Amino acid sequence: MQEKWSLRLIRISAIFGLIGTVLGSHMAGAGSYAFRPIHAHILLVGWLSMFAWGVFYKIYKVRAKKLITFHGWTAIIGAIGLTAGMWLQFLQPFNVNTTLSLILYIVGGTILLVSFALFVIVTFLTEKEGKR
């Protein structure tokens, strides 16, 4: 279970990393920095945090297996919800209702906040060294 989540989080982080660098390249080429907050959150939350969590699960053995699954899903859903909500809220690409985009932005961010809190708990539920 833990190995699966480690690889899953690292793969998702790679996708976020690619999207973030493509956005950065687009901004540099276009000379417009409209995507700057979305670009930053995609790279920090999507690429960096998910990668770090994936590596953590590879290195440490966690006693609470179900908590790993809950953390993983909240991380993925929260990162996608937050960054997609930011994109819809700030850039309004499809003329989506602003209330709907704000709700996606807030709910995604809240789920991501839960994910970070769960990770704090996970760090205290690791096996002692030498058990892995």
Image (cartoon, rainbow, N blue to C red):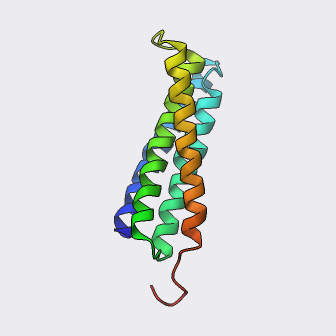
Residue 126: percent from left, percent from top: 53, 77
Determine whether 90 is above or below 39 in the image: above
Instruction: Between residue 47 and residue 75, name the one nearer to us.
Output: 75
Q: Quadrant of residue 41?
A: top right
Residue 57: percent from left, percent from top: 47, 68
Image side of residue 65 versus residue 107, left or right? left
Residue 72: percent from left, percent from top: 44, 55
The residue at the far bottom in this view is 130
Q: Quadrant of the N terminus?
A: bottom left
Image side of residue 61 versus residue 41, left or right? left
Q: Quadrant of the C terminus?
A: bottom left
Determine whether 52 is above or below 14 in the image: below
Image side of residue 109 versus residue 132, left or right? right
Residue 131: percent from left, percent from top: 47, 88
Can residue 20 be seen at all in this image of the molecule?
yes
Can residue 10 be seen at all in this image of the molecule?
no
* Residue occupying image coordinates x 57% and y 31%: 106
Determine whether 60 is above or below 50 in the image: below
Q: Quadrant of residue 32?
A: top right
* Residue occupying image coordinates x 40% and y 69%: 65
* Residue occupying image coordinates x 42% and y 49%: 12
* Residue occupying image coordinates x 51% and y 82%: 127
Image side of residue 28 versus residue 46, left or right? right
The residue at the far top in this view is 95
